[in-house]
Image (tube, rainbow, N blue to C red):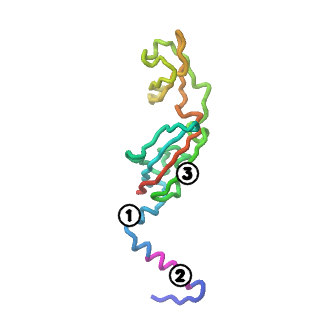
Amino acid sequence: MRIRCSGRRALFVAAVVLLAQTWDARSEEEKAAVAAPAKGKRISIEYTLVLDDGTEADSNVGGDPLVYEQGTQQILPALETALAGLAVNDRKKITIPPADGYGDVDPKAFREVPLEEIPEEARKVDAMLIGIDAQGNKMPVRVQKVGEKMATLDLNHPLAGRTLTFDVKILKIE
C-alpha cells in the first residue's frame, strides 16, 4: 500500500511510520522500561524516607524493592499520585505535608492508662507498643508520658504531624 503526501503532512506520516517501526523493534524489556505507572500496574521502587528534621526514617536501598499496585492505595495516595507518569530508572524527590501523609497530630488521640497496664520494660517515654483497636486491627502506640500511677499513650500514627520527603527510584513496571 502506498500513501501519497507532500510537504508537512508527508514529514508527519514518515515520522509516525518510523516511530511505529522503532517501537516494534524494541524488546519487551525496553518497552517496559519506558512504560509509566498506570492503574493496575505492579511497580517496584527503591526509596529513602527523610523526616522534616533531617532524620532518615526508612530506606530499602540495597535491599528488596517495595512492590505495590498503582491505583490501589497500597502506599500513601499523595506518593502514588506523584509517581504516576515516571518511567523505569526515573528518580524523584517528593515532599508530602502532614495533611497528605499521616495527618496532623490529633489531640484527642491521647489516652491515660494505669501504669500496671503497660509492660514494665515499656514504662518509658517514646517506648513503642502495639495496640489493638475495636475492630481487631493492630496499631502502633507510643508512650508519651510516664507518671507515678498513670501513663499517657499517643494513639496517633508515629509519622502524624511530620513532613515526609521520599527519594524514589522506579526499578520495574509490570
Q: Main secondary structure of the magenta part?
A: helix
Q: Which residues are magenta?
A: 10-21
Q: Locate the N terminus and report the quarter of the image it occupies.
A: bottom left
Q: Secondary structure at mark 2?
A: helix
Residue 66 percent location from the top left of the image:
42, 46
**Amino acid under disc 1:** Glu
Label 3, on which residue? 82
Q: Locate the C terminus and report the quarter of the image it occupies.
A: bottom left
Label 1, on which residue? 29
Residue 13 percent location from the top left of the image:
53, 81
Of the two numbered discs 2 and 1 on the same chain, state the one appearing first in sequence: 2
Q: Compared to 11, does 101 lie above or below? A: above
Residue 63 percent location from the top left of the image:
38, 45
Crowding near pointer 1: few (<14 within 10 Å), some, many (20+)?
A: few
Label 2, on which residue? 13
In depth, the one of 165 and 73 nearer the eye is: 165
3D distance between C-alphas at marks 1 and 3: 24 Å
Of the two numbered discs 1 and 3 on the same chain, state the one appearing first in sequence: 1
